[in-house]
Image (spheres, helix red, strand yellow):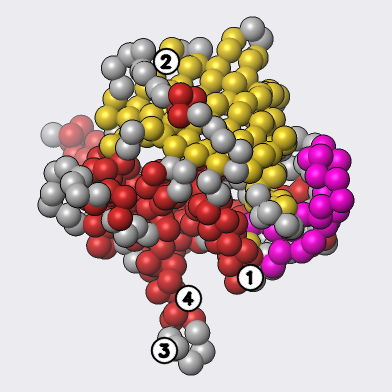
């Protein structure tokens, strides 16, 4: 019994000593935890500031004139009966340089427009290509990569019908040709109008400035209008965060900005995310002769550069499209747009509808924030 009591006494004394020790060191533990949490928060705050400084650089001074100029360029493309051009593509991804060539054909206007856009490249003997063609009210996207071939199809009539809330299932009485459509929907028919509309949706631009065209564009004495675009905050949130669990009606500016703030604090930005984009339009014809995206490692993404210094060609662009031998309104035969898929296409119309709805929700959120930021409120 004495043996048991001695062990119990020792245990009680030991527990008491541990309790006393815990009481002594607990404040130090709490201070350490508080310090660690404070350091983590400071690191997250610094990461957020660094990321925002990258994607919203102070040397890209946006101006509504840039957006209007891009809208004019889209309208000019829409008014062209025919467009024919060759193009050169250059990209730098994860230390690899990819070069490609292609051609662009556009015939007709609006809903009757036909497009054929082919881009081919080769790396270490492996050929890859992407073909986008609009014909007979369908958009086909055919991709050839090292992993195989994939063909996607979008029913443009169904896309228009769903966007307009029309319950009819087939065009009749010329409805397809006369149905009113939004500029956003027009841009979804493929080709350069779609690309420019996408830029206008995701980026806000500086005021256009006139520059001497780079010799590689072959424009001779025709100057170019240059603009630098930086991300719209809401669009960036839509790109960097997953909104699939958020109904389009619930996508507001506040929700998007909150998601963006959380993502900015989490860690570095993806290496393939463009920090800014340069667009060069012909001063006379407003054709987009050059579109260049800059990566986070590109010196031209630095916010320490003077604004004018941004208007130069990158030595290692994330991606650059350069058009040459551009011809307007020259007859293009219908046969060049005929497309017969060599494999069963995957119908992605519903995905395009969802994408369009979310894009329109993001644009509405952008408009709401702009209206709310006006000092006198919305103007009538």
Which residue was labeled with disc 2?
Answer: 149
Q: Is residue 51 left or right of residue 375?
A: right
User: Mark 3: which secondary structure?
Assistant: loop
Decide: is 169 above or below 230: above
User: Mark 2: which secondary structure?
Assistant: strand
Q: Say which of 48 and 296 sits in front.
A: 296
Q: Say which of 135 and 98 sits in front.
A: 135
User: Mark 1: which secondary structure?
Assistant: helix
**Mark 1–mark 2 distance (CA, rounded to whole Å):** 42 Å
Precedes in sequence: disc 3 or disc 2? 2
- Proximity of marks 1 and 2: CB atoms separated by less than 8 Å: no
Q: Position of residue 133 (x, y in %)?
A: 44, 31
Q: Residue 370 got which mark? A: 4
Precedes in sequence: disc 2 or disc 4? 2
Precedes in sequence: disc 1 or disc 4? 1
Q: Quadrant of the C terminus?
A: bottom left
Residue at 28% x, 56% y: name it.
179
Which residue was labeled with disc 3?
Answer: 380
Q: Position of residue 269 (x, y in %)?
A: 57, 45
Which residue was labeled with disc 1?
Answer: 65
Precedes in sequence: disc 1 or disc 3? 1
Q: Splitting the image into 4 quarters, where does residue 158 fall?
A: top left
Q: Which residues are magenta?
A: 207-229
Mark 1 Cα-neighbour bin, 10 Å: few <14, some 14–19, many ≥20? some
Mark 2 Cα-neighbour bin, 10 Å: few <14, some 14–19, many ≥20? some
**Mark 1–mark 4 distance (CA, rounded to whole Å):** 15 Å
Task: Indicate yes or no whether the magenta region holds residue 222.
Answer: yes
- Proximity of marks 1 and 3: CB atoms separated by less than 8 Å: no
């Amino acid at each position: 019994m004495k043996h048991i009591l001695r062990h119990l006494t020792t245990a009680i004394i030991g527990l008491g000593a541990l309790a006393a020790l815990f009481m002594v060191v607990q404040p130090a533990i709490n201070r350490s935890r508080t310090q660690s949490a404070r350091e983590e928060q400071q690191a997250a705050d610094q990461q957020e500031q660094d990321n925002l400084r990258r994607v919203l650089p102070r040397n890209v001074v946006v101006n509504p004139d840039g957006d209007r100029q891009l809208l004019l360029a889209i309208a000019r493309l829409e008014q062209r009966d025919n467009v024919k051009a060759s193009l050169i593509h250059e990209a730098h991804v994860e230390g690899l340089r990819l070069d490609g060539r292609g051609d662009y054909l556009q015939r007709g206007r609006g809903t009757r427009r036909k497009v054929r856009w082919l881009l081919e490249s080769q790396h270490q003997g492996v050929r890859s290509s992407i073909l986008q063609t609009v014909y007979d009210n369908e958009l086909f996207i055919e991709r050839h990569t090292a992993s195989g071939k994939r063909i996607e199809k979008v029913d443009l009539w169904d896309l228009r019908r769903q966007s307009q809330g029309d319950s009819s299932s087939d065009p009749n009485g010329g409805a397809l040709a006369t149905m009113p459509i939004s500029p956003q929907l027009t841009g979804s028919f493929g080709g350069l109008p779609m690309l420019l509309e996408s830029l206008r949706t995701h980026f806000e631009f500086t005021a256009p400035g006139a520059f001497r065209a780079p010799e590689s564009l072959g424009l001779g004495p025709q100057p170019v209008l240059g603009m630098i675009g930086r991300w719209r905050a809401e669009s960036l949130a839509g790109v960097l965060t997953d909104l699939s669990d958020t109904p389009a009606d619930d996508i507001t500016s506040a929700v998007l900005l909150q998601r963006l703030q959380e993502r900015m604090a989490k860690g570095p930005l993806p290496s393939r995310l463009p920090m800014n984009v340069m667009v060069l339009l012909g001063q006379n014809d407003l054709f987009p002769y050059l579109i260049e995206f800059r990566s986070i490692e590109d010196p031209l993404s630095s916010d320490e550069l003077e604004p004018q210094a941004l208007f130069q060609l990158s030595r290692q662009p994330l991606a650059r499209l350069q058009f040459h031998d551009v011809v307007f309104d020259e007859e293009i035969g219908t046969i060049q747009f005929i497309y017969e898929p060599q494999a069963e296409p995957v119908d992605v119309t519903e995905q395009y509808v969802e994408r369009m709805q979310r894009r329109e929700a993001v644009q509405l959120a952008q408009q709401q924030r702009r209206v709310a930021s006006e000092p006198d409120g919305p103007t009538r």
